[in-house]
Amino acid sequence: MKDFIPHYIGVTGVQTAREIETLVSAAAAAGIGPGQAHNLMLGALASPSTVQNQPPTHTSKPYRHVPSREDLVALLQSAQRHNIIGMVHVELHKTWPGTTRDGDAVIELLRYLGAHHLTPAVQLNGVLLPTDIVRIHHETGVRIVIQLRKELEELGESQLLDYLQAVAPAVSTILMDPSAGAGTTIDLAPALRLMRNIDQQLPNTFHFGFAGGLGGSTEAEIKQTSYIIAELSRAIPNGAFSVDVETKVRVPIEQPGIDRLDSALCAGYFSAVIAGRLSR
């Protein structure tokens, strides 16, 4: 049986172990975490070159990435101590068909983490051929999330289903994420329709996650997030889904073009998620 990732409420863009301490407390206050309906997932953004202390590649957002391999190890060790999901979100090429070099870099990074007794789930943010995705899983044993980006959806549904069938042995979760970190709110109707079509063609093969536009900084964002959670709870039995946030829980800092994770915005997001659960 496939080793599925537990359903989670995620925050992506965590950069230090210290941030985890704050977010674990805020999530627990909202009833999110070990022993609850949804676990807490804290995602670390990592370019394969960034974690080797080289200039970042394949991304325009280096400020959201973990600064070094040492920081990534400390972050994942902290998640492990708290019994929450620490996930590595690896930035890849965004154009089809991707590159085998990206697959090699992911494997090398995961072997480094394995040497520190860490086997985190990994989310692939970009495009890789099915053979490379299966190779990553085969060589490292990690649980894999693929980000269902527009580059994959543009294949058309028939080719997309063929792609998903090819990666099925390796992939635990499909993240419906047309926003891909841009903060654009997900359109639930087509996302749920595609989820149902995938599940009909490949039954009981994947868990599903949803991202795009979630947050808790304004009344409108709280209302929108609660609505999305309520709709997902109605559409998917037993709350068997995950959600993830990135852009809407960050605030600018003095340096132009740079932002940072904000614990108060994360707390607002957690509260909006719980409000959505209660209103379903």
Image: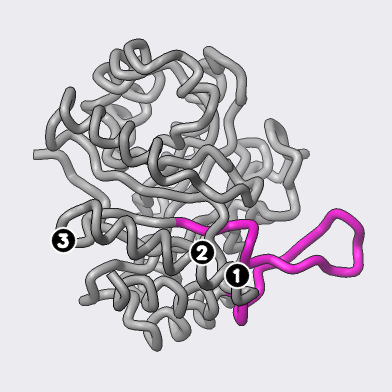
Instruction: State yes or no: residue 134 in magenta.
Output: no
Q: Amino acid at mark 1?
A: Ala
Instruction: State yes or no: residue 264 in magenta.
Output: yes
Which secondary structure, mark 3?
Answer: helix
Q: Residue 98, located in which quarter of the rendered image?
A: top right
Instruction: Locate residue 156 relative to residue 73 in the image: left or right.
Output: left
Residue 17 in view here? no
Q: Residue at x 33, y 32 (%)?
A: 194
Picture coordinates of residue 146 (x, y %)?
41, 35
Q: Which residue is mark 2?
A: 224
Instruction: Locate residue 143 relative to residue 152 in the image: left or right.
Output: left
Marks 3 and 2: which is nearer the front? Answer: 2
Which secondary structure, mark 2?
Answer: helix
Q: Residue at x 51, y 64 (%)?
A: 224
Q: Amino acid at mark 3?
A: Asn
Q: Which residue is mark 3?
A: 238
Residue 230 in view here? yes
Q: First in sequence, mark 3 or 2: give its number.
A: 2
Q: Residue at x 37, y 63 (%)?
A: 229
Relative to 24, does residue 15 appear above or below in the rendering? above
